[in-house]
Image: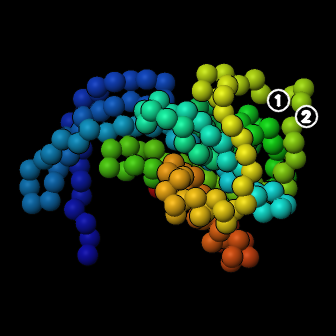
Protein backbone atom coordinates (compact mmCIF):
# COMPACT_ATOMS: atom_id res chain seq x y z
CA UNK A 1 0.00 0.00 0.00
CA UNK A 2 1.35 3.41 -0.92
CA UNK A 3 0.73 6.37 1.33
CA UNK A 4 -0.87 9.67 0.49
CA UNK A 5 1.52 12.23 -1.01
CA UNK A 6 1.53 15.08 1.49
CA UNK A 7 2.28 18.23 -0.49
CA UNK A 8 3.27 21.58 0.93
CA UNK A 9 0.88 24.21 -0.44
CA UNK A 10 1.97 27.26 1.56
CA UNK A 11 4.45 28.19 4.27
CA UNK A 12 4.44 31.15 6.69
CA UNK A 13 7.51 31.83 8.80
CA UNK A 14 6.57 32.63 12.41
CA UNK A 15 10.03 32.81 14.01
CA UNK A 16 13.66 32.55 12.88
CA UNK A 17 16.45 31.95 15.37
CA UNK A 18 19.97 30.54 15.45
CA UNK A 19 18.93 27.00 16.42
CA UNK A 20 15.48 26.64 14.94
CA UNK A 21 12.79 28.27 12.84
CA UNK A 22 9.03 27.98 13.29
CA UNK A 23 6.69 27.71 10.31
CA UNK A 24 2.98 27.25 9.73
CA UNK A 25 2.67 24.86 6.78
CA UNK A 26 -0.48 24.22 4.76
CA UNK A 27 -0.34 20.54 3.75
CA UNK A 28 -2.62 18.40 1.59
CA UNK A 29 -4.49 15.67 3.49
CA UNK A 30 -5.85 12.24 2.47
CA UNK A 31 -9.41 12.44 1.17
CA UNK A 32 -8.95 16.01 -0.07
CA UNK A 33 -8.48 19.36 1.58
CA UNK A 34 -5.56 20.79 3.50
CA UNK A 35 -4.58 21.30 7.12
CA UNK A 36 -2.19 23.69 8.84
CA UNK A 37 0.71 22.15 10.76
CA UNK A 38 3.05 24.23 12.92
CA UNK A 39 6.60 22.96 12.47
CA UNK A 40 9.90 23.59 14.21
CA UNK A 41 12.81 23.19 11.76
CA UNK A 42 15.83 22.26 13.87
CA UNK A 43 19.57 22.17 13.06
CA UNK A 44 19.93 18.67 14.53
CA UNK A 45 22.04 17.34 17.36
CA UNK A 46 24.40 14.63 18.51
CA UNK A 47 24.59 12.75 21.81
CA UNK A 48 27.19 10.37 23.19
CA UNK A 49 26.91 7.22 25.28
CA UNK A 50 30.44 7.27 26.70
CA UNK A 51 31.21 3.85 28.15
CA UNK A 52 34.36 3.27 30.18
CA UNK A 53 36.33 0.04 30.62
CA UNK A 54 34.43 -0.73 33.84
CA UNK A 55 31.07 -0.68 32.03
CA UNK A 56 30.05 2.68 33.41
CA UNK A 57 28.29 5.33 31.35
CA UNK A 58 28.85 9.07 31.65
CA UNK A 59 25.75 11.06 32.62
CA UNK A 60 25.43 14.81 33.02
CA UNK A 61 22.85 16.58 35.19
CA UNK A 62 21.88 19.87 33.61
CA UNK A 63 19.24 22.51 34.26
CA UNK A 64 16.66 22.78 31.45
CA UNK A 65 14.57 25.92 31.59
CA UNK A 66 11.61 24.67 29.48
CA UNK A 67 10.91 21.89 32.03
CA UNK A 68 11.89 24.03 35.01
CA UNK A 69 14.39 21.63 36.49
CA UNK A 70 17.42 19.40 36.20
CA UNK A 71 17.55 16.36 33.91
CA UNK A 72 20.00 13.48 33.65
CA UNK A 73 21.32 13.45 30.09
CA UNK A 74 24.10 12.21 27.85
CA UNK A 75 26.85 14.60 26.76
CA UNK A 76 25.18 16.22 23.75
CA UNK A 77 24.97 19.30 21.62
CA UNK A 78 23.82 21.00 18.46
CA UNK A 79 25.04 20.54 14.92
CA UNK A 80 25.81 24.23 14.72
CA UNK A 81 29.46 24.34 13.63
CA UNK A 82 29.89 24.86 9.87
CA UNK A 83 31.68 22.00 8.13
CA UNK A 84 31.79 19.77 11.20
CA UNK A 85 30.74 16.16 10.62
CA UNK A 86 28.61 14.27 13.10
CA UNK A 87 31.38 12.18 14.64
CA UNK A 88 33.56 15.27 15.11
CA UNK A 89 30.64 17.03 16.81
CA UNK A 90 30.16 14.07 19.13
CA UNK A 91 33.84 14.09 20.07
CA UNK A 92 33.70 17.85 20.65
CA UNK A 93 30.67 17.59 22.93
CA UNK A 94 32.23 14.73 24.88
CA UNK A 95 35.33 16.84 25.49
CA UNK A 96 33.38 20.00 26.33
CA UNK A 97 30.84 18.44 28.70
CA UNK A 98 32.70 15.46 30.20
CA UNK A 99 36.39 16.31 29.75
CA UNK A 100 36.91 13.07 27.82
CA UNK A 101 38.26 11.92 24.48
CA UNK A 102 37.37 8.62 22.82
CA UNK A 103 39.64 6.26 20.94
CA UNK A 104 36.64 4.62 19.28
CA UNK A 105 33.29 6.09 18.17
CA UNK A 106 30.45 4.14 16.50
CA UNK A 107 26.87 4.98 15.56
CA UNK A 108 24.48 3.59 18.13
CA UNK A 109 21.02 4.88 17.14
CA UNK A 110 19.24 7.74 15.35
CA UNK A 111 16.27 9.46 16.94
CA UNK A 112 13.55 11.86 15.80
CA UNK A 113 13.08 13.48 19.19
CA UNK A 114 9.56 14.86 18.74
CA UNK A 115 8.31 14.33 15.16
CA UNK A 116 4.80 15.60 15.88
CA UNK A 117 6.09 19.16 15.59
CA UNK A 118 9.88 19.16 15.16
CA UNK A 119 12.29 18.05 12.44
CA UNK A 120 15.07 17.51 15.01
CA UNK A 121 17.13 14.41 14.29
CA UNK A 122 19.61 13.27 16.92
CA UNK A 123 22.44 10.88 16.11
CA UNK A 124 23.58 9.00 19.19
CA UNK A 125 27.10 7.63 19.22
CA UNK A 126 28.77 5.04 21.40
CA UNK A 127 32.20 6.25 22.56
CA UNK A 128 34.74 3.84 24.07
CA UNK A 129 38.45 3.77 24.91
CA UNK A 130 38.02 6.92 26.99
CA UNK A 131 40.82 9.15 28.23
CA UNK A 132 40.76 12.33 30.28
CA UNK A 133 41.34 15.70 28.63
CA UNK A 134 44.41 17.29 30.33
CA UNK A 135 43.39 19.86 32.95
CA UNK A 136 44.92 22.79 31.08
CA UNK A 137 43.01 21.98 27.89
CA UNK A 138 39.51 21.62 29.32
CA UNK A 139 36.53 23.60 28.06
CA UNK A 140 35.43 26.64 30.10
CA UNK A 141 31.74 26.01 30.86
CA UNK A 142 29.22 28.88 30.92
CA UNK A 143 25.51 29.44 31.60
CA UNK A 144 23.65 26.20 32.46
CA UNK A 145 26.82 24.19 31.92
CA UNK A 146 28.56 26.06 34.75
CA UNK A 147 26.81 23.96 37.41
CA UNK A 148 26.53 20.77 35.37
CA UNK A 149 27.25 17.62 37.36
CA UNK A 150 29.15 14.79 35.61
CA UNK A 151 28.96 11.24 36.99
CA UNK A 152 29.70 7.69 35.89
CA UNK A 153 27.02 5.07 36.48
CA UNK A 154 27.00 1.35 35.75
CA UNK A 155 25.16 0.92 32.43
CA UNK A 156 22.63 -1.53 33.87
CA UNK A 157 21.97 0.80 36.80
CA UNK A 158 21.42 3.68 34.36
CA UNK A 159 18.86 1.59 32.46
CA UNK A 160 17.15 0.80 35.77
CA UNK A 161 16.89 4.57 36.35
CA UNK A 162 15.24 4.91 32.92
CA UNK A 163 12.66 2.26 33.77
CA UNK A 164 12.06 3.84 37.18
CA UNK A 165 11.23 7.18 35.51
CA UNK A 166 14.30 8.93 36.91
CA UNK A 167 15.83 9.55 33.45
CA UNK A 168 13.38 11.11 30.98
CA UNK A 169 15.52 12.94 28.40
CA UNK A 170 14.63 11.27 25.08
CA UNK A 171 18.17 10.99 23.73
CA UNK A 172 19.42 9.61 27.03
CA UNK A 173 16.62 7.03 27.25
CA UNK A 174 17.14 5.88 23.66
CA UNK A 175 20.93 5.86 23.95
CA UNK A 176 21.03 3.86 27.17
CA UNK A 177 18.53 1.25 25.98
CA UNK A 178 20.32 0.92 22.63
CA UNK A 179 23.69 0.59 24.38
CA UNK A 180 22.49 -2.28 26.54
CA UNK A 181 21.02 -4.04 23.51
CA UNK A 182 24.21 -3.53 21.50
CA UNK A 183 26.38 -4.72 24.39
CA UNK A 184 24.27 -7.85 24.87
CA UNK A 185 24.57 -8.57 21.13
CA UNK A 186 28.37 -8.37 21.27
CA UNK A 187 28.36 -4.88 19.69
CA UNK A 188 27.20 -6.36 16.34
CA UNK A 189 24.40 -3.74 15.84
CA UNK A 190 26.87 -0.82 15.85
CA UNK A 191 27.28 1.15 12.61
CA UNK A 192 30.30 3.03 11.26
CA UNK A 193 30.82 6.54 12.62
CA UNK A 194 30.58 8.05 9.11
CA UNK A 195 27.31 6.38 8.10
CA UNK A 196 24.98 8.92 6.44
CA UNK A 197 21.90 10.08 8.35
CA UNK A 198 18.58 8.44 7.43
CA UNK A 199 16.38 10.37 5.03
Percent position (x, y) of residue 98? 75, 40
**Relative to 180, 132 lies left or right:** right
Image position of 5 with respect to 148: above or below: below
Distance CA(mark 1)–CA(mark 2): 7 Å
Q: Residue at x 40, y 37 (%)?
A: 41
**Relative to 68, 158 lies left or right:** right
Task: Find the residue positioned furthest to the left.
Answer: 32
Q: Residue at x 60, y 46 (%)?
A: 73
Quarter of the figure with residue 173: bottom right
Image position of 55 with respect to 65: above or below: below
Image position of 61 with respect to 54: above or below: above
Does residue 191 show up?
no
Of the pair 51 and 16, the residue shown nearer to us: 51
Q: Residue at x 38, y 43 (%)?
A: 118
Disc 1 secondary structure class: loop
Q: Residue at x 8, y 55 (%)?
A: 32
Does residue 171 show up?
yes
Point out which mark residue 46 bears. none
Classify mark 2: residues with Cα within 10 Å, few (<14), some (14-19) or many (20+). few
Quarter of the figure with residue 26: top left
The residue where tag 1 is placed is: 138
**Relative to 191, 118 lies left or right:** left
Of the pair 182 and 58, the residue shown nearer to us: 58
Percent position (x, y) of residue 42? 45, 37
Split into 4 quadrants, where in the image is the N terminus? bottom left
Whether tag 1 and tag 2 are in contact, CB under 8 A, the answer is yes
The residue where tag 2 is placed is: 134
Amino acid sequence: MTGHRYELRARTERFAGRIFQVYSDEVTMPGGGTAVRDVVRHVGAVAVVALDDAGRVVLVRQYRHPVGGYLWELPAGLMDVDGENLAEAARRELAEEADLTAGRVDVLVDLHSSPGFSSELVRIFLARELTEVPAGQRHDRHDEEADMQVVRVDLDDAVARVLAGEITNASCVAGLLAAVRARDAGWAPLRPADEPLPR
